[in-house]
Every structure is written in C-alpha cells, then in structure tokens.
Amino acid sequence: MTPEEFWSILHDVPEPAPVFYRLYYSDDGSLVCYSMEQLPHNYIEIDADLFALQPHNIKIVDGKIKYIISVPTQKLIPGTTGTPCDPRDICVVVPDTQPHTKWSKQIRESN
C-alpha cells in the first residue's frame, strides 16, 4: 500500500451518524419507551442525562415532559375492623362491649 492509498482510504471514512436520544409516547401522553432508534410512535428528543435516568413517572403534555407526583391521601372509613368509636361521635373511643362503629384508616395514592 502506498502512502497515497493510505491517505485516500483515511479521507474516505464516512462521518458517524448523529446520536439521537428519544422518548416515545402514545397519543394520550403516556410513556412508551426510551430509544435511540426510529420507531412508529410520537417522540420528543431528550438529552443524554434524562436518557440515562429514564424516569417512568412522566407524561407528555403539549410536547413537554410533566412529572407525575403521587400524593398519598388518608381517609377514615367505617367497617367491620378498626377502632370502636361511639356511633354519635367518632372522637370518642369505646370498648367493644358498648354499641359502636369501627373505623379504620384507608390510604390511597392519587396524582
């Protein structure tokens, strides 16, 4: 191989394809996947840091990422188990032998 051939081969090396980080989402804005490939879904381009983290608590609204924050709520509900309370006043705890309504705490997670 001559030096001219070597240099011509070196100059003929194609440029590498650009790297794209994409977040694919469905029509309702929910996350489909993170990918660097071309897939048949809606997508937005993201940076390498977000691609490395790949959070799943997100939704896409108007082409922008919105984080979904879960907030647990607590509620007292009457039932067959729980703390026996006076039927007229939930603040008064009574023994099981006395007429009562049992109350227990229900925890729900909402967005």
Image (spheres, rainbow, N blue to C red):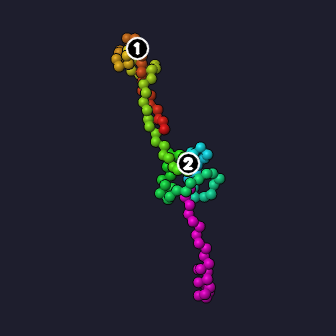
**Local secondary structure at mark 1:** loop
User: How many numbered discs, if any?
Assistant: 2
Q: Nearer the viewer, residue 81 or 56?
A: 56
Q: Tell me, yes or no, whether the highlighted magenta stretch contains residue 6.
A: yes
Q: 51 or 27: which is nearer to us?
A: 27
Give SS at disc 2. loop
Q: Nearer the viewer, mark 1 or mark 2?
A: 2
Q: Earlier in the sequence, mark 1 or mark 2?
A: 2
Q: Is residue 9 magenta?
A: yes
As drawn, 108 above or below 66: above
Query: What amino acid type should be assigned to the residue bearing mark 1?
Result: Pro
101 sits left or right of 16 in the view: left
Which residue is at a point 35% across and 15% down the rendered structure image? 94
Question: What number is the disc on residue 62?
Answer: 2
Q: Give the residue displayed 55% in from the left and 56% down from the top.
A: 45
Mark 1 to mark 2 CA distance (whole Å): 51 Å
Q: Nearer the viewer, residue 87 or 59?
A: 59
Q: Amino acid at mark 2?
A: Asp
- The residue carrying mark 1 is 87
Quadrant, the N terminus: bottom right
Estimate the x, y position of residue 5 in percent, counting from the top left. 62, 85
Q: Tell me the crowding category of disc 2: few under 14, some 14 to 19, or many 20 or more residues within 10 angstroms, Cα based.
A: few
Magenta stretch: give its range. 1-22
Instruction: Give residue 101's position: percent from left, percent from top.
Output: 42, 16
